[in-house]
Image (tube, grey):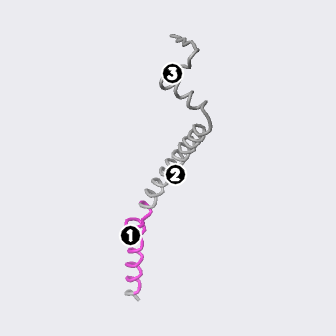
């Protein structure tokens, strides 16, 4: 009877060791869950960015207005016949 109790204690000890310190332990699962949550946030940010870029691409494909707007904002270009006025604050 003592041998069976000893075997059960050793078996329970081994299972407890694997639960707390072994491969796939509670601590390791918690770490992986934290990493997964961080990656989900990054994926959502990337999806939002991709949607914005896709909308900009569609806008650029549709017409000249978007091209003109970018030329004005980024390159400082103006149309002929327009007057450029710069406001300094």
The answer to whether the residues at label 1 and label 2 have Cβ atoms under 8 Å apart is no
Tell which tag, 2 or 3, sits nearer the viewer: 3
Element under disc 2: helix
Q: Position of residue 59 (x, y in %)?
A: 60, 38
Residue in the foreground of this view, choosing between 75 and 16: 75
Q: How many angstroms separate mark 1 from mark 2 (CA)?
A: 31 Å
**Magenta region includes residue 16:** yes
The answer to whether the residues at label 1 and label 3 have Cβ atoms under 8 Å apart is no
Q: Position of residue 13 (x, y in %)?
A: 39, 74
* Residue range corresponding to the magenta coloring: 4-27
Residue most extreme to the bottom: 1
Q: How many angstroms separate mark 1 from mark 3 (CA)?
A: 70 Å
From this view, report whether residue 77 is shown above or below residue 85: below
Element under disc 1: helix
**Magenta region includes residue 25:** yes
Residue found at x 48% / y 57%? 33
Which residue in the protein does label 2 denote? Answer: 40
Residue 77: which disc? Answer: 3
Which residue in the protein does label 1 denote? Answer: 17
Q: Main secondary structure of the magenta part?
A: helix
Residue found at x 58% / y 14%? 81
Residue most extreme to the front: 80
Q: In the figure, is residue 56 to the left or right of 20?
A: right
Q: Which sits earlier in the primary sequence, circle 1 or circle 2?
A: 1
Residue in the foreground of this view, choosing between 25 and 54: 54
Where does the N terminus fall, quadrant-wise? bottom left
Tell which tag, 1 or 2, sits nearer the viewer: 2
Q: Which sits earlier in the primary sequence, circle 2 or circle 3?
A: 2
């Amino acid at each position: 009877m003592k041998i069976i109790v000893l075997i059960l204690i050793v078996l329970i000890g081994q299972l407890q060791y694997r639960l707390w310190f072994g491969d796939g332990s509670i601590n390791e699962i918690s770490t992986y869950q934290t990493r997964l949550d961080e990656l989900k946030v990054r994926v959502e940010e990337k999806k939002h960015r991709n949607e914005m870029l896709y909308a900009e691409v569609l806008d650029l494909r549709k017409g000249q207005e978007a091209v003109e707007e970018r030329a004005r904002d980024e390159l400082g270009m103006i149309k002929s016949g327009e007057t450029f006025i710069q406001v300094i604050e």
